[in-house]
Structures are given as structure tokens and as C-alpha cells.
Image (spheres, coloured by chain):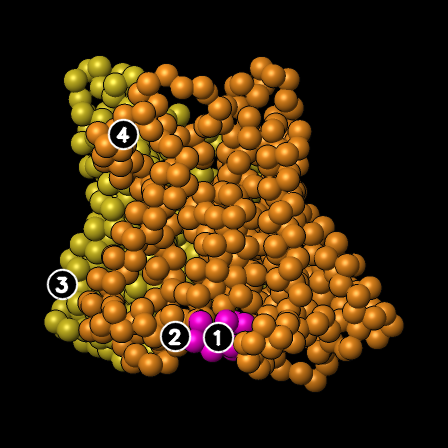
Chain colours: A yellow, B orange
Amino acid sequence: MFADVLISLLDLTIRLSVPLLLACLAGLYSERSGVFDIGLEGKMLAGAFAGASAAAVTGSAWIGVAAAVLAAVFFALVHGFAAITNRGNQIVSGVAINFVVAGATILFGQAWFKEGGRTPQLTGNARFDPITLPFADALRDVPLVGPIYAELISGHSALVYIAFLMVPLTWWVLFRTRFGLRLRAVGENPAAVDTAGVSVTWLRYRAVIVCGVLTGLAGAYLSLAQSPGFVKDMTAGRGFIALAALIFAKWKPVPAMFACLLFGFLEAFGIRFQGTAFPFIGQVPVQLMQALPYILTVILLAGFIGKAVPPKAGGVAYVKER
Amino acid sequence: MSAPYAKLPAWADYGLIPLINLIVAFFVAGLVVLLVGESPFEAVQLMIKGAFGSGRGIGYTLYYATNFIFTGLAVAVAFHAGLFNIGGEGQASVAGVGVAVVCLAFDSILPWWVTFPIAVVAAAIFGAAWALIPAWLQAYRGSHIVITTIMFNFIAASLMVYLLVNVFKAPGQQAPETRTFLEGANIPSLEPLLNMLGIAARRTPLNITFFLALLAAFGVWLLIWRSRLGYEIRTMGHSPKAARYAGIGEKRIIIVTMLISAGLAGLMALNPIMGAQDRMQLGFVGGAGFVGIAVALMGRSHPVGIILAAILFGMLYQGGAEIAFEMPNITREMIVVIMGLVIFFAGALEHMFRPAVQATLASLRPSSMGLKPKPAGDA
């Protein structure tokens, strides 16, 4: 009985962590290159809307994913244009993108589909179905390993596996490739990278594009796999939780995964045990559970649980002439 | 935040550049309107008619503008110190708790002109208190104020739901709101004044908080440009290094500036709670904290600019409702898009047109660009 509850709780944790994880890794690329990104939320929302719209019209989930990625990359490039090319304030740009997307998705949703800002319910091939991994059904009855494999690891949509595969991939790109080395360098000391003859601008634009692709996937997961379609404001602050997770993980991919799993677990716990009274503590208000990721992030930022040191050149535009 | 790129004459810096940015933002907004299949020109007509075409429209426009003056001033004061306070939304909503507590406690025993000043003080204190932790963390632990104030917005949102559902909700009532206030917390409406000016206004929420907003704008002008503290704030905003060199206590300025900023954001809570709804409802801030960012950027952090920008956004809020009513393809969220575009073009891309403006002005009148030596003074 207890094991069942635990497994279903962990299963929900994985489902809820995926959009956080994709957005968090997206922010990791951008911020490691020295471009702050408050606009993860907006890009994710744009991806969710574009993905659900395209899937609703074409009936194909994969075309939806492509549209989601394109929309998010578009806004990533807008952010890049302001932050890299025009040396604008990166935080202001991110805030602006969040607002434009929050308004535009509802506006276009209403104009195109006339369902109060929603997209039509997606069914069949327009949605991502759970994938049953090999032998999942056969192993189900094996004690301990069986339920973990069949319930926890198997039975998710393709985007879940992609998200978790992105973690080792990001680690490899960042720490084992030339691109990753330069990416990290440009976030710490762009002048040195420039002196070595590598374009700071192009490097940062590539980082921002990768950020767009990943936020697009995060949005696609929300509207094509987790829910059957787009609902207004469906990101509901997840972009900021992802940002919090990124700081929590000190801009490193593997800790980022654990941070996202932790925040996903908090959300899952809040949903499962809403209104349950605990021994000694009593009933924990659901609002406290919802606020917990933000409270934890503030405590972390305060430097009481190890100091989070951001990339040195983060938020500063590079000026070649100086 | 206010360090200029290249020197421009003041009229270009405070007039021309914001105007160009604004025109581009509205041009893009017009494209969005075209994309959803409506006519931008008709939309503008509807908006102006909705905002200024009737006494009621004017009343609502100025009512919304009141909110945005407070939140715009809040963002601007922080900008002057080089701080970005995104937390206006959370600070205003927590300030609402202060206002509500004062109103609920005194509305049956005191007249409004005693309750109101107490509520003003409570709003400022509660708003400022919500910024104390982010300010302290920025000053003493170097935690980025942008991230912490965003986090505090979310924490405030959860807190407000909790308080309204579990503490303030009157027994036997469904909606998460306080009970309706009594006589002692009803501040005067400005309807008689509008009527005296020949504007037939009925059922508008415009109230005396509007004058408090104008007073606050004047106070901010005094503070920033006519006081020692304001000088220190501006010095730190221009160059923290210079400020440190001049013996200005950086930590003190960060905390004091953030408290003033959040206090101003907090005053916004008076307008909807005491002036319009006579109760505290969930979500009474309604995004005003974020509009403040756009207003401050557009108004170039100057009180006069902020009042003008606030009226423009008040017009957008009120006129936008009219458009949403008349045009089936446009929803209220069009305002959010316009707000985002204004923040983008007036804020993130504020320097984009500067080189072009500079080159044009220089070719037209070299003296205006300071190409000949001239006495320093305007910065």
C-alpha cells in the first residue's frame, strides 16, 4: 500500500519535473554564455501555444513540436537581438517577452479558435502517447523492480525520455566539446574568447538558439503530452521555478536535474496530499507547498546553503571596442 | 539603468527618443491587430472613444492611471539607484493586507478622514516590509534583487490566497474577499469634481487617491532632485564606485531606496480597496505592479513622464475594454501585448534608435550635439 503511494508520487514527480528540466537546461545554455534569461517562462508559453495550435490544425504531434521549437527560437532570437546585438538590458528584454507572449497567446488563441484562449482538445496522433518500454508488462509482477520499471520508468511520452537524455548530453557538450569550453569561457570572460579569435556574438547567439529549442520542447510537453491542448497561462510560473532550479543547481547540468526533481516532487507532494493532516505538523496549507520552491530559492540566494555564483559576465553585453 | 550611451540634448533624450520608441511599439501592436484580422485604425478610434469619449470613460482612465502612477514611481525610484524592483505586484498586494486591517478595525468607529491617513501609513509600511528581505539580501549578501523580488511576487501570491481564504473571508461567504467596509472607510469619489468641470461622470471609481498619487509624484521629484538622499541615490545609480569613493553608504542606500520604492508600490493598494471596491478582493492589484515597469521606462523615470505614461496606460486599460467589447477578435489581453512591446522598445531597445537620432541631429545642428565645447551641467 505504502509502496503504491510512493511509486505513484514519484511517477507524478517525473511528469511534473520534465518541463522544469527542459527549461532549466535551456536557461543553463543561455546563462553560461553570459545572457541572462528571465524570459524562459514566455518562450515556454509561446512553444506550448504554437505546438498545440499546429497539432490541432495538422493532427500531428511532431509537427506541433516543430512549431513549438520555431516559436520559442523566434523569441530567443528577439531576446538575442536586444541583449547581444543592441546591448539592451537583458532583464528588461526578458520581462517584455514574458508579457508579449502572455498576451499574444490568448489574443491569437481567441482569434483563431474562438474557445476563450484555449486551443481545441487534442486527440489521437495530435498528442504524445505513453511509450511502453520492452518487457514492462512482463516484469510488472516481479517484486520491487517490476513496479519501478513498469510504472516509474516505462509509460512516459517520448519528450520525457528526451528531457532526461538531455542531461548527460548537456554535460557532455558543456564539459567535453570545444563548443562547450568556449561557451563557458564566453560567460566568464568574453574578452579572452574574443582575443582568441572566436566571435563572442555568434557564440552567444548559438547559446540563445539552443535555449529557444529547449524551451520550445518544454512548452510542447505541456500542451501536447501533459495536457491535451493549450490553456491560457498554462506555464503558471514554471519558467521562474526553472530559473530558481538553475540557481539552486549552481548552473550545472546534473545538479539541475536533481533540483528540478526536487521542485517537481514538492509540486507532486502538494497535489497528492492536499488537505491531509500530518502527525506533529498538522495540516500544511497547500499555498505553503506552492510557495516552497520560491522560498527555498531565496534562502539559497541568501547564501546560507552554499553560495550560488553566477557566470561572471552574465547580464553584461560585450563591447568589442573597449 | 540610467547611464546614457551618447549625449543628446535634453529635449531629444526625454522627448524624441521615448516618442520614437513608443511609435515603434504601437506600430508593432498595429501589426498584431492586423494579424488577428481587425483594423488598427478602427481600434485606435474605439480606444480613444472608450477612454475619453464619456465622463465615465475619463473617470476610469484616471482611476487606472492612479494605480500606475504609484507603481511607476516605485520602479523609477529604484531605477535611480540602479536597482530593478520587479516586485511591485507582490508589494502592492501585501500592502492591501495593511489597508484591509486598518479599514476592518476602524471603519465603524472613525470617520473616513481619520481612517484614510492611517491606511496610507499602513499601506506604505506593509509594502515596504515586503521588500525588506530582498533589499537586505541585496545589500548584505549580494543576492540579485531581480530574482528575489520575482520570488517574493510568487510567495506573496500564495500568501494572499491563504490569507483571503483562511483569515479574511467572512463566514458563510464564497468569494475570497473581506466583508464590505462601512461608512468610516469610504473615501470620497471625485465624481462631484468631474461634474463641476462639466464632465458628466456617473459610477466611476475615481477617488481622492488620485490626488495622493500626484502628491507622491511631487514628493518623488523633491526626493530625487532636491534632497541629499536623492543625490546619493542618483550617484549610486550612475556609478556605485564613485558613490563608494564619496563615502556614500552603499548598503544603506540600497535598503532605504528599496523601502521607499516598495512603500510607493504599496500605496497603490488604497485605490482599488478603499476607493473602488470597498473591500479587499483576490487579485486586486491586477498587474499594475508590472505595468509600473513599462510606465517608468516610458516616463524615463521622471515624475512628469510617469504621470503622462500612467495616463496613457490608463487609457489603454479603459479603451482596451471598449475594443474588446466591440471587436470580437480582440480580447483584453491586447493591453498586455502592448505593455510588453512598450517595455521592449522603450526599455530593452532604448538605444537602438539613438545612433540614428544622434547622427541626424549632428548633421542638422552641430552645436546642439555638444560638438562645440559647452558648459557641462546637463547629464
Q: Which residues are magenta?
A: B52-60
Residues marked 4 and 1, same chain: yes
Q: Quadrant of residue B374?
A: top left
Residue A32: give x, y in percent of width and height: 32, 32
- CA gap between label 1 and label 2 equals 8 Å
Q: Amino acid at mark 1?
A: Gly
Majority SS type along the magenta span: helix
Q: Look at mark 2 in the image and give the residue it sits on.
A: B49
Q: Residues within 10 Å of mark 2 (few under 14, many from 20)?
A: some
**Gap between marks 2 and 4, in whole Å?**
40 Å
Q: Which mark is residue A63?
A: 3
Viewer-proximal residue among A49 and B41: B41
**Is residue B59 located in the magenta-colored stretch of the structure?**
yes
The one of A47 and B106 positioned closer to us in this rendering: B106
Which marked residue is nearer to the observer: mark 1 or mark 3?
A: 1
- Chain letter for mark 3: A
Residue drawn at x 33%, y 51% as measured from the top left: B22
